Amino acid sequence: MLNINANAKSQAEKSIGSSNVLLKLEKLTTGYRFSQSNQSQLHSNLNCNIVEGELIAMLGPNGAGKSTLIKTLTGMVPELHGDVHYKGKNLRHMSNKEVAREVALVLTDKIDDRYLTAFDIVGTGRYPYGSFMGRLTKTDKEIINNALTLVGADDLQKRFFYSLSDGEKQKVLLARAIAQDTPLIFLDEPTAFIDSPGKVVIMNILSDLVLKHKKSILLTTHDTELALNYASKLWLLGKGGFFTQGIPDKLVKAGMINKLFDRKGVVFNAATRKFESNPDML
């Protein structure tokens, strides 16, 4: 059974409706523009918020546009239409450093530099504050050490990043996001390539960040069970522009998980909250 931080989820669900809006999407259209007249649209007219103290899991099949949405929210991929606002300020008018003070981003991209230690990696999280290009201050070092402690990675700080296991690397990248000291943290598949106990460790760390440190987290995942157990809200993305959001229990009861994922021979069982083989659909 999963070691679920139920208190964190309960407290995060209570935050929904909070007036402290950290991120606002208004009529947002995501996709890719190849030329002035040629574009590939994924989702359109997205209107939703992220408020303080939420843990939002983004679910959807491969190719639905989850990673593209995260990259659009951080300016890595330009929006096709609509607006993204951080605390009322339009992303279009923000510098990279301003964005980096609002949101920390953890992607699945590999870091191949064989000369960086775990401490060095976490130290890059201090870049938005002007410390990375020069000597780290005493305050920077304290923040880095605290971040490593928070994720249980004190013993990794002197090891070269490339030598760490996938689970250890994910802890270090989380520590970097924490050291960046932003109200928002976005993660793309944070539990990919990690064994089941390691996934629970990572999700418990994220829950603690929400409950004890007032962070708001948006993550993509293919692990529906983890998402339903930990998230205070779900964003469901499907192909053909499908998008809906809401509290996990309500979406399950409304059959939204089935609508998104059921396929020939496999069905989501709302009672057990697991995917099961269904010979009747073969």
Image (spheres, rainbow, N blue to C red):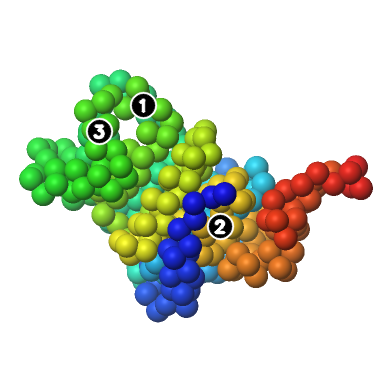
Q: Earlier in the sequence, mark 3 or mark 2?
A: 3
Label 3 sits on residue? 155
> Would residue 36 be visible to someone looking at this image?
no
Query: Percent x, y for residue 15?
Result: 43, 73
Q: Quadrant of the C terminus?
A: top right
Q: Nearer the viewer, residue 235 or 133?
A: 235
Q: Which marked residue is nearer to the observer: mark 3 or mark 1?
A: 3
Asked if marks 1 and 2 touch (Cβ < 8 Å), the reply is no
Q: Which marked residue is nearer to the observer: mark 1 or mark 2?
A: 2
Label 1 sits on residue? 164
Q: Nearer the viewer, residue 212 or 108?
A: 212
Tell me: residue 197, above or below residue 94. above
Q: The residue under label 2 is which amino acid type?
A: Asn
Q: The residue under label 3 is which amino acid type?
A: Asp
Q: Residue at x 40, y 79 (%)?
A: 19
Task: Calculate the distance from the C-alpha at mark 1 to the C-alpha at mark 2.
Answer: 28 Å
Task: Determine the image quadrant of residue 162.
Answer: top left
10 Å neighbourhood of mark 2: few (<14), some, or many (≥20)?
some
Label 2 sits on residue? 229
Q: Residue at x 74, y 64 (%)?
A: 255
| SS category of the residue bearing label 3 | helix
Task: State how many labels appear.
Answer: 3
Task: Determine the image quadrant of residue 244.
Answer: bottom right
Task: Calculate the distance from the C-alpha at mark 3 to the C-alpha at mark 1.
Answer: 11 Å
> Would residue 252 be visible to someone looking at this image?
yes
Query: Percent x, y for residue 105?
Result: 38, 47
Q: Earlier in the sequence, mark 3 or mark 1?
A: 3
